Amino acid sequence: MTASIDLNADLGEEPQEEPRDIALMQHISSCNIACGGHAGDAGSMTRMLLAARDAGVAAGAHPSYPDREGFGRTSLDMPLGDLIDSLAAQVAALAAIAADLGVPLAHIKPHGMLYNDLADRPDMASAVAQALHRAFPHLALVGLAHGAFEQACADVGARFVAEGFVDRGYTPARRLIPRSQPGALIASDEARAAQALAIATGEPLTASDGSLIHVMAQSLCIHSDSPGSEQTALRIAGVMASKGIAVRAPGELPYDSDVADLLRR
């Protein structure tokens, strides 16, 4: 059986860039659609869902801290119950539109600082995983590979999709380098494709301090707002094909046993 990896992108976040998002869907296998917390509205959700359906791309929700002004890139000091209510409402908004359009949803991937907080705060990760799995038991939960959210999802019996990044640098702790620091962003197509292939095959990455780390992921993210994202996605697909690795959504077919062994390390 051929090995496979998912290639995803966060879409529907910038109204002026919808043509770019729709073009990017030709080269990815799943997408995460902004659903009102940091960006997105009913119109953009509808357009992204229809584009995903037409491209055969698995669609998911991309909720965040309710922070449109800051684009969800700041931790909000808010009661955990209020945060969970907001996240559930965001996902439900997308789910309602998807149901009307007949487009199935596959997953939920938190956005921005919420994503990072869920990787580093076990208390928050546990509460959010439990609440989202209870409200949307048929949807997989996506998060940073090797973070607290991964364990929290396992604890509540939720299907978790571990994610790695092709256009971001890593710290020795297998966390993303903050965008404000040197090495946070990987600029070239060649370097992005090399990182994608390393993650897909279980090869080591070089962390910010020069040490080697392994990032075991089932899905790779390319940020749609990274310059050249469409070209990068096309290059990654070509590199994967040359190595016999199919680009497809995690739920489509079982993984090759060798890749599954790597993911369990």
Image (cartoon, rainbow, N blue to C red):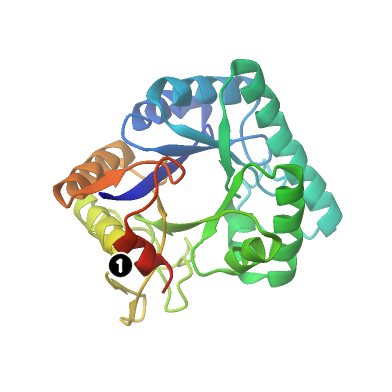
Q: How many badges with numbers are in the image?
A: 1
Identify the residue shown where x is 29% and y is 56%.
196
Asked which secondary structure carries label 1, the reply is loop
Residue 58 in the image: x percent, y percent? 47, 34
Q: For this rendering, which residue is in front, 60 or 35?
A: 60
Q: Is residue 169 visible?
A: no
Identify the residue shown where x is 27% and y is 54%.
192
242 up-or-down from 55: above or below: below
Q: Is residue 157 visible?
A: yes
Q: Is residue 137 left or right of residue 168?
A: right
Residue 66 in the image: x percent, y percent? 73, 45
Q: For this rendering, which residue is in front, 153 or 50?
A: 153
177 up-or-down from 172: above or below: above
Q: Is residue 114 left or right of residue 55?
A: right
Identify the residue shown where x is 51% and y is 61%.
144
Furthest residue in direction top, as rendered: 101
46 up-or-down from 265: above or below: above
Residue where numbered disc 1 is placed:
202
Furthest residue in direction left, as rendered: 242
Q: Is residue 103 left or right of residue 215?
A: right
Residue 1 in the image: x percent, y percent? 26, 50
188 up-or-down from 26: above or below: below
Badge 1: residue crowd in 10 Å (few <14, some 14–19, many ≥20):
some
Quarter of the figure that contains the C terminus:
bottom left
Specify the quadrant of the image occupied by residue 226. top left
Residue 128 in the image: x percent, y percent? 73, 56
Specify the quadrant of the image occupied by residue 160. bottom right
The three-letter amino acid code for the residue at tag 1 is Gly
